[in-house]
Image (cartoon, rainbow, N blue to C red):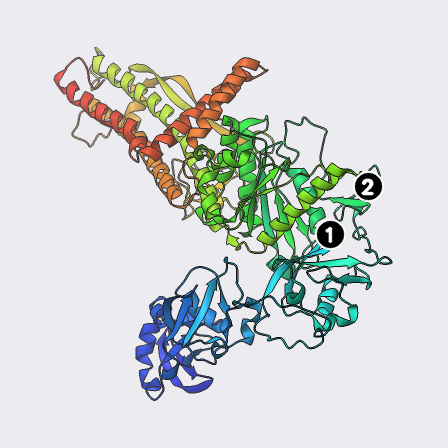
Amino acid sequence: MSKQIVKIILDGKSIGTKPLFENDSLTTIREKIQDKTKEYSDYIFIDKNGDNISKENEKDYNLQNICESKTIKIKSLETSNSGINVLLNDSKKFSINCSKSKYLNEVRGLINNNIQEDFLFLDQDGYTISKTDENDYTVEDILNNESIKIQANNSTTKKPSEEPKKVNDNNVNNKNLNKKEIDSSKLISIYLDGNNFAIKKLKLSDTLNIIRKNIGDKISESILFTLENGEKINILDESGLTLEDILIENKKINMISNKDSQIIKNTPLPNSKLIEQIGKLKIYKYPEVTLNDIEESTAISLLVVGQTGSGKTTLLNAFINALMNIQITDDFRYKIIIENFNHSQAFSMTNSVNIYNIKPHGNNPAIKIIDTPGFGDTRGIKQDKIIRDQIADMFKNKLKTINAICFVAQSSNARLTINQRYIFTSILDLFGKDVQENFVAMLTFCDGKEPQIVEALKEKDSIFDKIIPYIKGNWYYKFNNSAIYSDDIDDEFTQMFWKLGMKSFEGFISQLLKIPRKSLTQSKEVLRERQSIENSIKNLSDELQRGLTTMESIRQTLDAIQNSKLNVDASEGFEIKTKVTVWKSIPAPVGQYTTTCQNCNRTCHENCAYGPGESKSGCCAMDNNGYCHECPGRCHHTIHANLPILWRSYEETNTVTDKDLKARYYDNKSKLSKQTQYINGLKNDFDIITMNCLDTQERIKNSVDRLKQIALNSNSYESSEEYLDLLIESEKSEKKKGYIERIKGYEELKKQHKILREAYKNENSTTKSFEDFKKEFIAKEQNAKKDKNCCIF
């Protein structure tokens, strides 16, 4: 353990040096430097980011966390600064020690040590202070009776009890507004001539002339703001009025056009490409753009998932028009996804996971839309697994965090079919528990009525009902996108559906800005565990079959040895016919990556996401230390590669000779007879195969237990079995080419899912059959000693 001389800086002043070890905890350091600090008041340590470390957490930090350039920093705490109460939603929660001159952005770190939920500070009049303004306020600015108040960020801020402010021509130029009262920012809907024109994030203290500039060049100067009663505000008076003066229902403002004024129409973005024309409407492909580093770091990421045919593609195309503030009167529209109609509509329009970047527009930040292929098309479960692997690969290589998981479903489904329950389950299978509050249901093909699927999603067998209580704000939004590409803008239904869609997008965008960003680390672990379980179960099934074959071979060999008229100990020339397992390689499907052990000549993972040239350390066949838990040698990942072959086991008839047995099991130095050595050797082979199977099952059980802890949907196999039954019946009915082989595949999947379902219900169930084999083996061995005509079996 290395030791170094460290300089101690107290409130910016050097107070001496001290030799310290790298792994010294802050508690230990506090004891070691007490001779340097005894003349000063109490203090706290500062980490490398400049954040305070509370005394309660000092044991969790060491020198490496705070030492930079051989210097550690501490900050004094004045005795008069202690004991400031923190009130959450008017209830005292705890006290903190901090200076009254400390800025709120610094105090936030102290409070975060005590609570987990997001919050906002309240000023002395009860108004929330936006996070961006916390560096302008000190504790003293908001202190009330030695207390500071905070409010959960998901609750609506209420003004102090007072009458709404009224504005008239006599006082519009005599406003003297308190900065602290009105400094909070909020999303405001701007209506022009009765239509929703824009959504902007504005401060209550912004004057109307500032708001006009914020709106941009989309309006002429002859467009005027109005008061709540509809009275026009002269443009010359805008500098004396604030947003708060004209706010309607705390969420919107109105503007009105004079006779000679008109909206400056939207025009297509540079680099957008004209792709088609629908009547009078020109349709442009939204340009492919790259986000800069700042845009990437602040972008809102949306993962969009849904069933094939749910209207996902049209919804996303409508969404880009809402983000670009396209009006029904504009003569063009955007598409971000171009549909491919060259194949059956039973297939998903999207064949792979695609990420679409949207540049910041207006007050909206950059947005990343991650579009996924539809689950449940006619290509079946195999295609759904491919989609899941693609999403897992995206989590690994392209996406680290997520803001919202948009779950698209048709509104007209009054009850969920087996197919739909399976699809919903498959989607939830992708995620960890820590993102359950980030889901939003986007219901398509809606009319003015309550969507029927709302009640269906709330039913217990829908799976989705488990996460609804955790979703903050609206858990679903209604959409009807039939009007988005209609050029008949005078039609009553076109106008109605346009307004319905844009109003829903308005609410949806507003909620997006509030949803907390989440790491995908846990979801990546969930997907890896699922892949590992499925791969291990397949290999376990093969291992079981080979084990049974070996058991039969042992039985035949031992029976032949026991019943041979020859004296085995004296014989040198007998032969025994048995069934054995042999390994042969076959070509792998073109384009399919495998994880193949080049030492054991085994296929450890048939369909791996890691292709040629990539390290196999991330393959689901590898454990956390990089060793394979599937191949017989438990070899390191560096011994594995993507090869264009698959190793398969086959049963063959084999002739076992005394020479073979002697080479494998006989030791001339042993005091045991040759026959006994043969028997012991064969039994040992059986034990090795049995224990390998038990080891695989134990690993499956551990993965199942881990999924129970972290997966949003830990047990999805019952719905999968129902779905497989449905597919089998469909195949039997239609009898299309290759249906017999497909049915065999579905039956094999059912066996695997049954093993998993039992594993979830009873943690010991997966090893039960092998334990029975073991007991049976021992029992027959004991019986064999009593029966001279039978050795073991």
**Which residue ends up furthest to the top in the rendered image?**
565
Instruction: Say which residue appears at 53% left-offset and 18% top-offset.
Output: 730
Residue 293 visible? The answer is: no
Q: Amino acid at mark 1?
A: Gly
**Location of residue 682 with respect to 7 vertically, above or below:** above
Q: Secondary structure at mark 1?
A: loop
Q: Which quadrant is home to the N terminus?
A: bottom left
x, y percent for residue 364: 66, 57
Mark 2 highlights which residue?
281
For the residue carrying disc 2, how many other residues have a C-alpha within 10 Å: few (<14), some (14-19), or many (20+)?
Answer: some
Between circles 2 and 1, the one closer to the viewer is 1
**Location of residue 83 with respect to 773 vertically, above or below:** below
Figure quadrant of residue 486: top right
Q: Amino acid at mark 2?
A: Leu
Mark 1 highlights which residue?
194
x, y percent for residue 705: 35, 41
**Label number found at residue 740:** none
Q: Which quadrant is home to the C terminus?
A: top left
x, y percent for residue 439: 52, 45
**Which residue ends up furthest to the right in the rendered image?**
260
**Location of residue 711 with respect to 75 vertically, above or below:** above
x, y percent for residue 554: 29, 21
**Location of residue 445 with respect to 202 vertically, above or below:** above
Q: Report the side of 142 relative to 295 (left or right).
A: left
For the residue carrying disc 1, how many other residues have a C-alpha within 10 Å: few (<14), some (14-19), or many (20+)?
Answer: few
Q: Nearer the viewer, residue 608 or 133?
A: 133
Q: Nearer the viewer, residue 513 or 368?
A: 513
**Which residue ends up furthest to the bottom in the rendered image?**
39
Residue 381 visible? The answer is: yes
Figure quadrant of residue 168: bottom right
User: Mark 2 and mark 1: span between their CA atoms?
Assistant: 23 Å
